[in-house]
Image: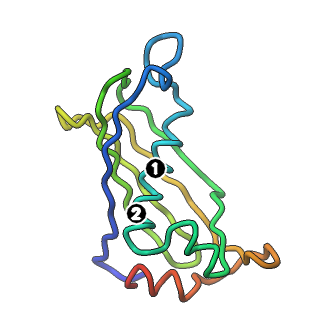
Amino acid sequence: MKNNFKRTSTIEYTTSFHDTDAMGVVWHGNYLKFFEKAREALFQKFNYGYKEMIESGYLWPIVDARVKYIAPTIAEQTLQIIATLEEYEHRIKINYTIKDSLTGKKTTSGYTIQVAISALNKEMSFVTPPIFLERFGL
């Protein structure tokens, strides 16, 4: 893997009442949605959004995900969600950090791992497709 590369995107998201559970905190399952929003922004930043991904002939399903809950978040709290491409050889690993926008306090961290599959025959690629490396400047 190449050293000293950082491909990062940061978004802000203000939680809504519908994001919370009966205890008044953001429901744990919504964090994967937050990760998705940040990952989508990261891919779009490098002109490899879902439309371009499909056009390139590859799909990138998630094969592993982890969420670590550090502090609760509540409705109407503005979060900073950071997605960083950490690995790109043979698979993609994206790390996530969620912070309270006002205090900077970390509330959540995690990662997702994705693999490339052919959009045509759904076979997994064991190497990172050249189009991904090109788009991300790797």
Say above or below: 82 vs 34. Answer: below
Side of 105 relative to 137 (left or right): left
Question: Looking at the image, which residue is at 23% across and 34% down?
Answer: 105
Q: Amino acid at mark 1?
A: Lys
What is the number of callouts on the image? 2
Q: Is residue 47 left or right of residue 78?
A: right
Q: Position of residue 84 (x, y in %)?
A: 37, 61
Q: Which residue, given by chain and number where applicable, does mark 1 sit on?
A: 37
In x, y percent, where is residue 62? 63, 57
For disc 1, the neighbor class at 10 Å (few under 14, some 14 to 19, many from 20) is some
Residue 104 occupies which quadrant of the picture? top left
The residue under label 2 is 42
- Give whichever of 66, 98 is nearer the camera: 98
Q: Residue at x 59, y 84 (%)?
A: 129
From the viewer's perspective, tell me whether residue 62 is left or right of residue 49: right
Residue lying at the far top of the rendered structure: 23
Which x, y percent locates residue 12?
Answer: 31, 44
Q: Residue 72: x percent and y percent?
A: 38, 24
Q: How is the image coloured?
A: rainbow
Q: Amino acid at mark 2?
A: Leu
Q: Are marks 2 and 1 in contact (CB under 8 Å)?
A: no
